[in-house]
Image (cartoon, grey):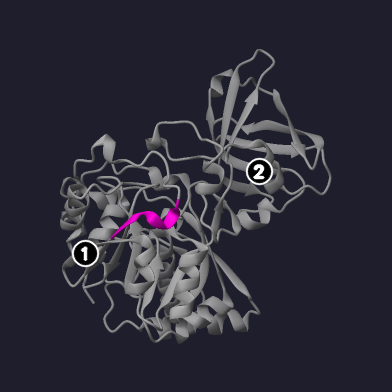
Amino acid sequence: MTKLTAIEDIKLSDYEYTLPEEKIAKFPLENRADSKLIRYQSGIISHHRFFDVPDFIPEGSMMVFNNTRVIPARLIFQRESGAKIEIFLLKPLHPSTVINEVMLNSSSVIWETFIGKLKKWRENEILQGEISIHGKTEIINARLVDRELKHVEFTWSGSFIPFVAIVEAAGEVPIPPYLNRKATKEDKSRYQTVYSRKEGAVAAPTAGLHFTEEVLQNLEEKGVKKEFLTLHVSAGTFQPIKEEQVAAHPMHSEQMVFDLETIQNLAAQNGKIIAVGTTSMRSLESLYWFGLMLKLNGKSVFSIPKLYPYTHLENLPDRTEGFGVIIAYMQENNLKEITGSTEILIMPGYEFRVCDGLITNFHQPSSTLILLVAAFTNGNWKKIYEEALDNNYRFLSYGDSSLLWRN
């Protein structure tokens, strides 16, 4: 395995490029699968449309999708004075830190948040708003329980109404800040994948936005297997790298959920595994490291640090063995699913343990996602991006796509 002995030499300035404003896709295409697709394999670049993607996935391959669902995480409350206070949900704290559990909770919840115009929110002031659920007016209350940490408690008047219904009724879709526009009605459906199921993300796993039911059906007819995991994308995905020495970047933590059957199918997969999106990629690679931690320690907390553990070891197990350790652990503990967190920062020098292919959009300059693409393409990211810019590809969340194969 490649030893990461020179991560201090990875400099931010080597992963910059000029992204003209007109190349940023401000709105989605009418048909998801009409987006352009760059295919990169064995150093060769070719140009296609996304609806052609089933032609390029070998029979017997497995594609892994992130089924997280974006919640309308931007809540706007209006004080009696008329001043508006925005509360942006970041991560749950009570009654659980597990997002899926909190979204289904029907009593009070506490979240860590970002608060716009915090100074206007007086001590002990309870903000109120009216929402309509199933034709009935409900009252939602927001109370600031920790001003410094921006912890907010939400309560609501209706009994047996889950928190997910509250935010669906009250919130706005948190489209990416670089779009420089307000969310529209169209964004509520288009800023979701067609297979989104598990509420809790504040940003979409955008590689999946290109898939339609027809494309998924064509993949199935070809004999391509599908598996789903959940990584709830956090607002940290938009956090720029500010340190020239990229290893010093404070990587954000994101919550992952895998079920036992998915891990069993991953372990049994003999063909290629293609991650749909960097979130799926980071989750799958993190899952491998958790298996190794279990193998070495007998038991372990499913929490993967930024600089991936045990890279100094030789003769690491393959993905089948690594996943097999997790399967045995879950069966011993009667677990049908497992929840963990990851801060993994994948950058050049990383040796991929799970994924053979990656479907992903075109990312912001000097971002952690550019580092991941650079690692996966053995440093050829700039060639791919220059080709995309020269051929008028649309960039970022609502932009075009790429299918990358590991060299």
- Is any atom of residue 294 visible in this view? no
Check disc 2 and give the amino acid type.
Answer: Glu
Image spot of residue 355 (x, y percent): 35, 73
Q: Is residue 378 left or right of residue 370?
A: left
Q: Residue at x 25, y 45 (%)?
A: 365
Q: Residue at x 46, y 44 (%)?
A: 235
- Disc 1 marks which residue? 46
Q: Is residue 41 left or right of residue 177?
A: left
Q: Is residue 172 left or right of residue 4?
A: right
Relative to 300, does residue 239 appear above or below in the rendering?
Answer: above
Query: Quadrant of residue 364 in the image?
Result: top left
Q: Residue at x 44, y 59 (%)?
A: 208
Image spot of residue 191 (x, y percent): 50, 47
Numbered marks: total: 2
The magenta region covers 31-37
Query: Quadrant of residue 258 in the image?
Result: bottom right
Q: Residue at x 56, y 58 (%)?
A: 196
Q: Choose the circle earlier in sequence order: 1 or 2.
A: 1
Q: Secondary structure beneath disc 2?
A: helix
Taking the magenta stretch, the answer to whether it contains residue 309 is no
Check disc 1 and give the amino acid type.
Answer: Ser
Give the crowd class for mark 1: few <14, some 14-19, many >=20 residues within 10 Å.
few
- Disc 2 marks which residue? 168
